[in-house]
Image (cartoon, rainbow, N blue to C red):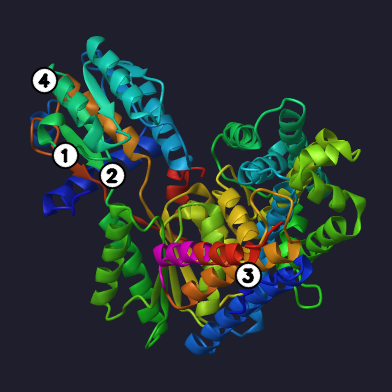
Amino acid sequence: MITDSRPAAPAPPRLRREVRHAGLVAALVLLALVGLVTRPDNFATSANLVGVLALASTIGVITVGMTFVIIGGGIDLSVGALMALASVWATTLATQSYGPAVMVLCAILVGTGAGLVNGLLISYGRLVPFIATLAMLVAARGLAQRMSDRRTQLVRPENDAIEALSTGRILGLPPVVFVFAAVAAAGWVLLNRTTFGRRTFAVGGNPEAARLAGIDVRRHTLLLYALSGLCCGIAAIIIMARTTTGSSTHGDLYELDAIAAVIIGGTLLTGGRGSLVGSILGVLVFTLITNLFILNGLQTSDQLIAKGAIIVAAVLLQRRGLRTPT
Amino acid sequence: MPIPSRRGVLFGGAAVAAGALATACTGNDPADDAPAAQSAAGGGDNEKPGRPVTIGFSAPAADHGWIAAITKNAQAQAKRYSDVTFRAVEPTNDINQQISAVESLISAKVNALVLLPNDGQQLNQVARKAMDAGIPVVNLDRIFPDKLSYRTWIGGDNYGMGVAAGHYVGRRLKEKGVAKPVIVEIQGIATLPLTQERSKGFADALKTHGFSVTAKQDAKFTVETGNQVAANLLQAHKKIDALWNHDDDQGVGVLAAIKQAGRKEFFMVGGAGSANAMREIKAGGLLEATVTYSPSMAASAVKVARLVAQGRGMTDLVELQAPQSITLASETVTRQNVDSYLPIGFES
């Protein structure tokens, strides 16, 4: 592992970020080596690697939204529940009767709408993000259960265009992987190349200073949660494509998976600093671990231990990297 | 849940036959076929109205299709009898609420109770209280640890599910003449005793055919986890001969993953017996069979509670009173018999 451990001469922020990405890339390479050694015939097949990317796409899209919220100084605990709600709303018989395009639109609108409610409660209602989104988590799951009558709602055969997002192939990859890539690329541009992105860092770093600099902090916060909700809606489309269902059980504990990926990606939980590339690498690390464990026939409990260890290791490294006077 | 004794299996068969008949059609009265002597010993035709009784019912709130079907089946069965007043309390997943709900049924002096506890251990005390007050308790599926807490236990057989699946897989592979088959198992929540019993039954039955499980992996009974685990597991084994998935609801995700991976070389067996799985079996795809753990047991429980409250026995048995324990056999639903099972398949 490459770490920056020179306390006397702190590297400039940009370099430190590159160094941390190098750490994550090294972790990915290490995991790939483990895969190549333990299951040489199964790991490096295109089917397996495409499978890993497809599995990463739901949680990956959600993590993009989560990265924005956390850099902006907040937290969104409702992501998994919002994805479940959007998937259920988009697969009710009423919605399905309008065809796949309306189902997609419905999922996006439900996600964004619920995200807006989060944002309103936090920015204008002055609720602590943790509490507002916790309330949304509980309420959205409840609503999803009520709408679906706690049943698993199948995507009807006439709407199999939804499933085609997962079964189809463009350049050898299922379309859901391109959705993930598009969301990640758009997120990167928005965060690193636009005023919106710079404001996100400013609001998360020091909201008072941001306000004095003329940023409408409340409106910006509102937009961040709406953005996270939008990502949940897109993730709902992916999960519908993958499982051919909408269900109130979808996205269980996704909030924790997404936060974990953001943290090991090097974003500060207190906001103001972070990297989208790091978050994506974090998602890939976790998805690859699950893949490797199942390829080697190890049970879920072992995966959980490994994931916990990785989170702690990443945060310890992160703290070393950040021990600089600011 | 106990491993079925021989007696349990016998009773189970009888109860299942009665349950299937009751659910399939009302006109087919089981007592009609009963020999005269037994019918006399049993005290006449059980379907004919007897002393009016009130049956109390309490079950967890539905968090998936199986539990939803339990309450629905119990209600539907009670409706068939003019001599039964059915008192269901508000379903709840809260232990304390279920305890007070059962207490309210005790003070209402119902003639019998059908209880599916959220947790057998924690509801044991209140079930005992009902029995002490002279109200017979029919314990549905999740068993009370104390035998003084129930008059009759009726429930499914998780070990038997594994056995049924194992025999189906074993026989099919023998038919196909596969020498060293790759057999893959997708479990439910691994820490639950019921999952461990299912897996043990599966392994034991496979052993009688000279086979063993190549790989198993746990999911969480949800569509999404089924999909995720199957997607990875399919990559771990490039060629699979048979796959057993413990639960038909998570099976929806498993089937989607198989389709997305474009795999067709193996056959799959499900578990629980959802209507959706049965439709897949009927359509004749990869899913060839499912082994039941049927919520129709709730209808049977109401039937038994009525007999117990009226002091009648089961007419297919010689005894004058209803049995103490009924373990339902796990039945194998295939394309050949799926039509007769579709009516008891539950919507997941």
Q: Which residue is more in the foreground, B134 or B100?
A: B100
Report the amino acid beneath label 3. Answer: Pro
Give a yes or no on whether discs 2 and 1 share a subunit.
yes
Marks 3 and 4 close (CB-CB < 8 Å) = no
Q: Which chain carries label 1?
A: B
Describe residue A304's horizontal placement relative to residue B74 as left or right.
right
Q: Mark 2 lies on which chain?
A: B
Give a yes or no on whether discs 2 and 3 share a subunit.
no
* Residue to which mark 3 is pinned: A7
Q: Which residue is rendered at x = 66% and y = 36% of the image?
A: A129
Residue B285 at least partly seen:
no
Q: Height in image: A266 above or below B310?
A: below
Marks 2 and 3 close (CB-CB < 8 Å) = no
Q: Which residue is more in the foreground, B176 or A174?
A: A174
Residue interval drawn in magenta: A298-311
Q: Mark 3 lies on which chain?
A: A
* Residue to which mark 1 is pinned: B145
Q: Residue at the front extreme?
A: A8
Q: Which of marks 1 and 3 is in front?
A: 3
Q: Nearer the viewer, mark 2 or mark 3?
A: 3
Q: Which residue is rendered at x = 16% and y = 39% of the image?
A: B145
Helix, strand or loop for disc 4: helix
Q: Height in image: A199 above or below B196?
A: above
Of the image marks 2 and 4, the number of the one nearer the N terminus:
2
Distance Cα–Cα, label 2 vs label 3: 74 Å
* Residue to which mark 2 is pinned: B16
| Residue B79 figure quarter | top left
* Residue to which mark 4 is pinned: B132
